[in-house]
Amino acid sequence: MTETVDVTAALQGKVPAATARPSTDHPALNVSAADAVAVLRELKEGQGFDYLVDVTAIDWSSAQSPRFAVVWHVYSRTAHQYFRVVAACEDDREPAMPSMTSLWPAANWHERETFDMFGIRFTGHPDLRRILMWDAYPYFPLRKEFPLAGLPTELPDPEVSAETGTGLIAAPMSGGPFVAASGGPMSDIEPRAKDEAWDERNEKPRT
Amino acid sequence: MATEHAFPDTAARAGNLPKEFDSEKMSISMGPSHPSTHGVLRIQFEIDGENVTRADPVLGYLHRGDEKIAENMTYNQFVPYTDRLDYLAPLANNAAYASAIEQLAGLKVPPRLDAIRVITSELARISAHLMGLGAFGIDTGAWTVFMYCFTEREKLYTLFEKLTGARFTTSYSRIGGVTRDVSPDWLQETDAFCDQFLPILDEILGMLSRNKIFLDRTVGVGVVSAADAVAFGLSGPNLRASGVAMDLRKDRPYWGYGQYEFDVPIGSKGDCYDRYLCRGEEMKQSVRIVKQAIAKIPAGDWYVRDARRIFAPPKDKILTSMEELINNFMIVTEGPQMPAGEAYFEVENPKGLLGFFVVSKGGGVPWRLKIRSPSFCNLSILPQLCVGNLVSDVVSILGSLDFVMGECDR
C-alpha cells in the first residue's frame, strides 16, 4: 500500500489543488476540470499508469451542483494498481471537460459515449459525435431526468417516418402488465396487470 | 498499285481511345446484417477498388440502455441483464457483476464460492472461445471447424443446463452467492468433459494451424503493435496476441486464481493468426484451471452466511421460520442493502477486461452502474486497423477480434 500513497502524494505535489477522494477500493483523487489533463498526464507519463481502462460520468441529478462528474480509471501494468480520477464539470447546463484523446486514443470512443449519454462536451475531441444513439437523437438518455421508458421521438430516417407515418414511441410495455415500475406504492411497483380498477387505495367494487 | 500502309501515329490513336476512367472512391456499408460482422456491427467503408481507405464503425444497433435499466432495479434483478452483455459467456458476466457489488458491500466471500466462480467462468471462457474459433473458421472458409466447435460447446451447454437450469441465460449469481451449490456429480461430469475435450481441441486446432488457406488469410493480416494495443485499451486475447502479458488473473488474482497453475499465452506479431493461437492456447489453460479447481474444491459455505441484508436465507428456512421469511421478503422487495460509496471491479472475461463501476447512495438500487465492456474497447481500434487492407481481409480481422455486440452496445 505504500506505493499508492506515494502516487497520490506525488500527484498532489504536482497539482496541489487535487484532493484525496474517499474510496474503499482504489486510490482516488478529486481534481478540477482544468487540472484533469495535467493529473492524467502525470499518471500516464510519470507514474506508469499507461492503460486507460474506462471513462464515464456520473449525473448527481439537478438537485446537486456541480451536477456532472467525469470519472477516469487508469491501470498500471507494472504496479498492477488502479487509480481513479474524478473531475466535476463546472457548468451544469453546458457541461464540458477537456478531452484525453491526445494522451490515449482509447479515450476517443469512451468520450463519445459519455457525450452521447450525458451531453458532456469534451473540448479538443477530434470527432465528438454520438456513438450508441443516432446522430439526430435529441436527448441524453443517462441523465436523471430522462425517464426509463424513453421519450417519443422521430425515427432516425425521415424517409421511413414519411412513409410509415410513425415515430419512436416510449416503451410500449411501460405501465402494462408484467412490468415493474420503480418507486411509488407497492401496488404500482408489483409486476402484474395494471388495468385492474381496484388496488389497496381504491376498494374493489362490490357486485 | 502499291498501297501505302501508313500506320497511324500511336499517339494520335491513343487520343481516339476513350479516356481511362478516373478512379473513384466508393462508399459501402458492411452490416448491420452481414454474416461476417457477428451480430449487428455496421462499418461504413470508403473503398478504392478493393482497398479500404476509411472505416467508420456505426454502433448502437443493439443498444438497450442496460445502464439506465440498472439504475431502476435492485442489484439482484440486474443479474439476468448481465447474461445479455457477452451472451456467449453469461456465467462469467454473472460472477463478475456479483463480485463488483460484493466489493462495494465489502463482503468477504467463502473459498468454495470463489472456486465455483473460477470453474464456471473458465468453462464460460472455453465455450466463448469455441464459438469465436468456429465463427472465425467460417469467416475464413473452414466450415468443419465450426461443426467440431459446436459439438463441444453443446456438451458444455448441457453441463450449464444441469447446473443452472438454463443453457444460455444462466443468471447463476446472486449478490453474495450463487443460486445453488454445485453437486459432486456435476463436478465429476465436468472433469470428464475436460479429459475428453483436450484431444478434440488438438484436432480442431490441427485443422487450422497448418491450413494453407487459413494461413494465407490470417498471417500478417491486421497487425496490431504492442504500443497500439495498449493505447487503444485492447484487452484479453487481442491484447496478449500483440505481446503484452497482461492478465488480471495473474496480475491481481481475484477469486483465488493465485493458487492455480496456469500460463498466460502471448503472441509475437499481433496479427490475426496470433490472436487465433492465443485463444486456442487459452482454452487449454482454462482446462488446466478447471481440473485443478475441481480437484481441490473446498467444502463449506457457497454463499456469504452472515450477510442477512444481502443474501437470501435458505429456502427451507424461509418456508418454516418467520424471521427468515421477513428477511427474504425484504431482500426481494427492497433489494440487497448496500452502503453508500463507489467501487470498480474488473475481471478477465473471455473477450477481455469486463469491469463494473458502481456508485451507490445506499439502499438496494445503484445510483449509477457503468459497464466497461471489452468488445467496445477492442473495436475502437477498427478505424485504424481496417485502413489499407482489402475488404476480404476485414472479414478476417473482425473474426479474429472476436467481439460480441450485446456487450459492445449494452
Image (cartoon, coloured by chain):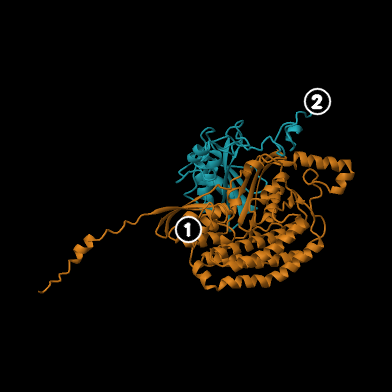
Residue A134 placed where, x, y %? 51, 42
Q: Residues within 10 Å of mark 2 (few under 14, many from 20)?
A: few
Q: Which residue is label 2 attached to?
A: A205
* B241 and B65: which is toward the camera: B65
Q: Secondary structure at mark 2?
A: loop
Q: Which chain is cyan?
A: A
- Split into 4 quadrants, where in the image is the N terminus of chain B? bottom left
Q: Secondary structure at mark 1?
A: helix
* B3 and A76: which is toward the camera: B3
Q: Amino acid at mark 2?
A: Pro
B76 left or right, relative to B378: right
Residue B357 placed where, x, y %? 63, 46
Q: Which residue is label 1 attached to?
A: B385
Residue at the spot 70% in from the left edge and 65% down from the top edge: B289
- How far is mark 1 from mark 2, CA to CA? 67 Å
Residue furthest to the left: B1
Q: Which chain is orange?
A: B
Residue at the spot 81% in from the left edge and 50% down from the top edge: B305
